[in-house]
Image (cartoon, rainbow, N blue to C red):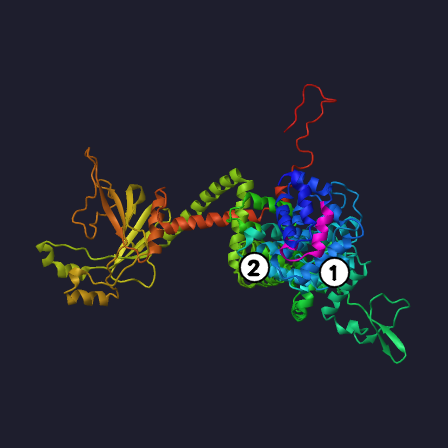
């Protein structure tokens, strides 16, 4: 609309005909967000007419009027309409519409106007000079006094199917909370009531009143409503008010942490006293009886102590000397221990005790049966969990950063990174985390000096369960996972994270340490494998298969002489491999003097095997002996079962280098002993000994043991896995021995200081 048409527009807006007013204000709402048009409209007296429409009309005319004023405020103009004596009436009219009018289009405009009124800072408008007290929470207080159901109806709109109305309602709540926080912090009147997780605030224009107001919002279901919105599918339409509410939650948590616990403040003193009384203190001290002796009352009794009357005389309570340490504090001055967590830590602890008083008392009673060094410090654990949650949710991070992150990542795939519904379940997460702390303490058998280690485990648990939880995951599932997460798996995660952190800090050095440890592990496993050879082992010996006629004629004689067991053992000087065959497996391991054959290891050319998977043998009789009762009876007489082995180790040597009298033996299943020959006529290899291990582990030990004796690399998966295991454990042990102060301690005093030349001649030197 052209600015020249504004006089005619104002004339129609002031008309007595409803149709004319409706059409005029309909056109106005589409043009008034142009600053140039709005400036002419205001200077022409348009605000007076617009105010009259809002105060007197209804239906669509009222809806268009509210929308026009809302858009005018969005461009930061028209704040003069809230000046003067009639400002309160206008605000009350808008509040009345929110309470009494059911039309969505009217509610949207009314909510939007109230968001502007509460969020506007005096002096920000173009003309300035705004009357103090016209804006912020104070502007709504008179109207809310007339319509006390206002806040209940606002929160009900958070369940509305109209996303714009829902966003305006949440925006109004955000504006109220933000106004209260800013005013209280500026005036230094932060209240000490309320709750957490977006539910704690100081009083806007009166701290205690604001605390009660926040508590009332909780009772009306504010937190549950916003929690459901954060988990809903309507994030695109509600992103900004939800992120603002999430940011305000962090602001409130941060402000509570900044409040120092001071026993001079009655509310802080009452909170600590409540903790003590909830712990069911020793009745001997409560009733003034210590060891059966009635203690007389001192002239001046300490504040907060109980007294009892015995006839006409009074007795005093004798305090337990471990009054606060039995609750898990380190000293008998608990206020100082809240320095890190602030009043937020006290609120978390008192909230846990209030909701779990029976469990709290039983826990303290159970801990009292343990030595002092083994007791879980409940209070310290609570404060530690508070700070773990504080760091996990990045409470110190500005809410504006979340909004910028949403604008940068507005692709629908990063909602889990930005929206944190579980932040609103702070109290429940604190309780679940504290119970997890108690469980870890018990599972690890921790002592007082292990407190930080258990806290680190709980930190990793929170990161793993809460941090990995999807946006739509219910808090009940999160609580169950925190209670059921396996402590062993958690320890593995800790080692992985520790290794990654060292990888980032000490990449090159860590690589060198790994290589060194791998070499040490290889030497260790080599010695272990060789010791297996030094100990000796039993092997099976299948009967050789011959198909020629002459051999068949002598088969009975061969079966009669068949010896199914072979024993091999490495000599003590590790130079010879001794072995011999036996008709049965002896009850003891034979010595070297009983092993008639030997192989000089220096003559071995290669060791070959088919070891790749666990050895699977089946008790199948030898095919050549299947029809021979004599052979079967011989095997039974010797106590051996004829197997068909699938794993074997074959030792090769050159034909000319047959050791000390031993003869090459034919390998079962091979018709010739020659395995390979070079093309230039050099000596060819042939097998000199074949071993059939009884299981896969034995095969791995002997194959890799023989290879390592020959200074070759082990090849079996079992040995390589053992090498990796040993080296990884060595690395973890070294990492666990590194203390944080050693990482960041810096150079020793005096390091790098160059000596002065004063008083020295040319004949001097210094050591760097």
Q: Where is residue 31 in the image (x, y as percent from the top left)?
A: 63, 43
Q: In which quarter of the image is residue 436?
A: bottom right
Residue at point 78%, 61% (across, down)? 267
| Viewer can see residue 505 | yes
Q: Position of residue 651 (x, y in %)?
A: 27, 47
| Residue 470 forms part of the magenta stretch | no
Work out whether mark 1 precedes mark 2 in sequence or the reverse, and give the earlier one. Answer: 1
- State the mark number for residue 643: none
Question: Magenta segment, which residues?
Answer: 46-64
Residue pointed to by mark 1: 144
Name the residue at the top extreme: 762
Q: Position of residue 169 (x, y in %)?
A: 64, 56
Residue 350 versus residue 40: which sits nearer the camera? 40
Q: Describe residue 576's horizontal placement relative to residue 121 as left or right.
A: left
- State the mark number for residue 161: 2
Q: Is mark 2 on a helix, strand or loop?
A: loop
Q: Main secondary structure of the magenta part?
A: helix
Q: Describe residue 474's horizontal placement relative to residue 641 as left or right.
A: right
């Amino acid at each position: 609309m052209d600015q020249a048409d504004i006089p005619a527009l104002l004339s129609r807006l002031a008309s007595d005909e409803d149709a004319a007013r409706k059409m005029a204000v309909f056109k106005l709402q589409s043009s008034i967000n142009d600053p140039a048009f709005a400036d002419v409209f205001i200077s022409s007296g348009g605000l007076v007419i617009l105010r009259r429409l809002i105060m007197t009309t209804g239906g669509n005319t009222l809806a268009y009027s509210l929308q026009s004023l809302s858009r005018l405020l969005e461009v930061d103009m028209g704040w003069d309409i809230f000046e003067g004596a009639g400002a309160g009436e206008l605000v009350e009219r808008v509040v009345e519409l929110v309470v009494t009018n059911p039309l969505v289009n009217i509610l949207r405009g009314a909510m939007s106007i109230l968001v502007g009124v509460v969020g506007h800072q005096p002096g920000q408008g173009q003309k300035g000079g705004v009357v103090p007290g016209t804006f912020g929470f104070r502007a709504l207080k008179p109207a809310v006094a007339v319509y006390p159901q206002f806040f209940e109806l606002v929160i009900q709109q958070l369940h509305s199917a109209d996303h714009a109305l829902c966003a305006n309602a949440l925006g109004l709540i955000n504006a109220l909370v933000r106004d209260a926080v800013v005013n209280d912090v500026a005036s230094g009147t932060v209240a000490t009531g309320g709750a957490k997780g977006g539910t704690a605030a100081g009083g806007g224009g009166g701290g205690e009143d604001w605390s009660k107001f926040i508590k009332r919002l909780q009772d009306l279901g504010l937190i549950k409503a916003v929690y459901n919105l954060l988990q809903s599918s309507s994030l695109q339409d509600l992103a900004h008010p939800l992120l603002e509410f999430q940011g305000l939650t962090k602001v409130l948590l941060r402000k509570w942490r900044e409040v120092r616990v001071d026993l001079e403040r009655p509310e802080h003193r009452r909170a600590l006293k409540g903790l003590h009384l909830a712990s069911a203190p020793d009745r001997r001290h409560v009733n003034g009886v210590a060891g059966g002796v009635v203690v007389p009352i001192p002239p001046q009794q300490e504040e907060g102590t109980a007294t009892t009357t015995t006839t006409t005389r009074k007795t005093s309570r004798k305090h337990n000397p471990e009054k606060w340490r039995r609750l898990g504090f380190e000293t008998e001055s608990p206020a100082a221990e809240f320095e890190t967590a602030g009043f937020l830590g006290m609120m978390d602890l008192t909230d846990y005790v209030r909701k779990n008083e029976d469990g709290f008392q039983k826990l303290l009673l159970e801990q009292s049966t343990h030595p002092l060094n083994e007791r879980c410090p409940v209070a310290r654990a609570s404060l530690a969990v508070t700070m773990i949650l504080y760091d996990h949710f990045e409470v110190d991070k500005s809410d504006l950063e979340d909004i910028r992150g949403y604008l940068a990542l507005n692709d629908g795939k990063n909602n889990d990174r930005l929206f944190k519904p579980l932040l609103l379940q702070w109290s429940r997460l604190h309780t679940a985390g504290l119970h997890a702390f108690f469980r870890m303490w018990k599972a690890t058998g921790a002592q007082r000096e292990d407190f930080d280690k258990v806290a680190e485990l709980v930190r990793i648990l929170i990161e793993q369960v809460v941090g990995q939880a999807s946006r739509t995951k219910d808090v009940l599932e999160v609580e169950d996972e925190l209670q059921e997460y396996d402590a062993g798996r958690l320890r593995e995660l800790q080692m992985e994270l520790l290794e990654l952190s060292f990888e980032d800090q000490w990449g090159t050095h860590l690589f060198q340490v790994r290589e060194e440890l791998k070499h040490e592990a290889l030497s260790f496993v080599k010695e272990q494998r060789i010791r297996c050879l030094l100990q000796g082992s039993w092997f099976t010996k299948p009967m050789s298969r011959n198909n020629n006629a002459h051999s068949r004629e002598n088969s009975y004689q061969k079966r009669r002489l068949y010896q199914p067991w072979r024993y091999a053992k490495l000599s003590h000087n590790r130079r010879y491999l001794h072995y011999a065959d036996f008709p049965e497996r002896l009850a003891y391991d034979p010595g070297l003097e009983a092993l008639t054959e030997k192989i000089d290891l220096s003559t071995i050319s290669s060791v070959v095997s088919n070891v790749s998977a666990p050895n699977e043998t089946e008790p199948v009789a030898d095919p050549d002996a299947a029809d021979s009762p004599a052979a079967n009876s011989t095997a039974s007489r010797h106590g051996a079962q004829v197997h068909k082995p699938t794993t074997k180790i074959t030792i090769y040597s050159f034909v000319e280098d047959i050791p000390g009298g031993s003869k090459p033996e034919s390998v079962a299943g091979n018709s010739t002993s020659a395995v390979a020959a070079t093309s230039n006529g050099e000596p060819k290899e042939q097998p000199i000994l074949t071993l059939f291990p009884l299981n896969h582990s034995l095969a791995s030990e002997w194959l890799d043991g023989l290879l390592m004796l020959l200074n070759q690399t082990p090849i079996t998966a079992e040995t390589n896995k053992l090498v990796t295991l040993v080296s990884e454990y060595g690395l973890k042990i070294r990492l666990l021995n590194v203390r944080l102060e050693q990482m960041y301690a810096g150079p020793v005093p005096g390091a790098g200081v160059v000596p002065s030349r004063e008083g020295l001649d040319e004949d001097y030197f210094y050591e760097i």
